[in-house]
Image (cartoon, rainbow, N blue to C red):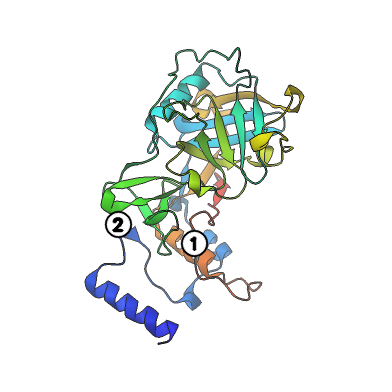
Amino acid sequence: MTQFKLSTLILGVCLILNACAPSGTTETEIDPEAVLTTAEAIDAASNDDWRDLDPANTLYMEMETGRIIIELAPQFAPQHVENIKTLVSENYFDNLWVIRSHDNYVAQWGDADAENPKSLGSARTNINPEWERDWPETLPVSILKDGDVYQDQAGYAYGFPVAGNQSKNKIGMAHCYGMVGVSRGNEIDSGNGSGLYAVTGHSPRHLDRNVTLVGRIWLGIEHLSSLPRGTESLGFYTTPEEYSPVKSIRLAADLPESERTHLQIMRTDTKVFKDYLDARRYRKEDWFVDPAGRLSLCNVPMPTRMRP
C-alpha cells in the first residue's frame, strides 16, 4: 500500500471514529499548494491579530548591552510569578550577575555568593513546583496536528509553547528557545525565582516537568546568547570577573509610559496564526527545494512587532 493510500485510510478511520484528533482547537487539513508564504501570512494579520504585552506581567531586564523583555506566565505558574514580582518590586536582582553561559543550552542569572546570599526580603524561600496545570476546555490551546515526541499533544497558548495530555487533564509550558525557567536544587520545592535561566540553545525538552517555567523572552535574547561560555562544569563562570552584571529588573507597569517598549505578539488563538503555522510547515518560498511538511513545537518563531 502506498504511503498516500495509507495516510488516506488512517485519516478516514480518524474521521469515522473521531479517535485521532484531540478535542479542543486543532488545525484542519489543507492543500499545501494553497498555503501562503511566511511573509504573506504575517502581512495578512490585522491589528486584532496582535496583542500588547501586559505591563503587570512584563519584565525589563537591563544589561550593560541593552534591554531584555520577558513576559511572565501567571496562567501556568502563578505562585512563582508572584514571588518573582515580589523580588523585582524589592529590587532583588539589581546589581546581580549572569553567572552561567552553557553552550547551546542556557544562560543563568542570580546571586553568585552562596556563603553570604542576598536577602530575599518578603519573598518566599520555597515554592512547590508548577510544572503542569489542569487543562480545562476553556484553555485557548492551538494544538499542532504534527504531534509531539515528549508529550501526547503540543501547541500554543497565550503565545507560549505548551505540551500535555488532555485525557489526563494536564498541560504545561515547554522548554523552547527563549523560555525562562526557575533554577532549583535536588529538592523539588527549592526553586523560588531568585535564580532564573533562559534557553539560549537547542530545546532541552527533557527538562519539561522537572523545572518550573515562568515565561518567555520576546526581545533582547542576544544579550544572553552572545555571552562568553563558562568554562566550569555546566557552563558556570570560574571567576567573578567573568560575570555579566544585571543592572536592574523592573516591571513595565512600574515605569512611565515613555520608558516602556511597546512590543506586540501575534495572538495564537486566531485563523491567521493557523495560516502562519501552515506557512512554516510547507515553506512556499522559492529557496526551499523539499519543504518538510511538518512542524515541531519549538521550531516556530513567534511573530513580534512594535505597536503601530
In percent of the image, x 54 and y 57: which residue is there? 299
Image quadrant assignment for residue 240: top right
Q: Where residue 287 appears, x then y in whole percent? A: 66, 72
Q: Picture coordinates of residue 168 (x, y %)? A: 27, 49
Q: Mark 2 falls on what kind of element?
A: loop
Residue hosting label 2: 24
Q: Residue drawn at (67%, 43%), measured in percent from left and top?
A: 103
Residue toward you, 46 or 203: 203
Which quadrant holds residue 94? Answer: top right
Q: Residues within 10 Å of mark 1 (few under 14, many from 20)?
A: many
Q: Amino acid at mark 1?
A: Tyr
Q: Nearer the viewer, residue 27 or 124?
A: 124
**220 versus 297 height, above or below:** above
Which secondary structure lies at badge 1? helix
Residue extending furthest bottom? Answer: 1
Where does the N terminus fall, quadrant-wise?
Answer: bottom left
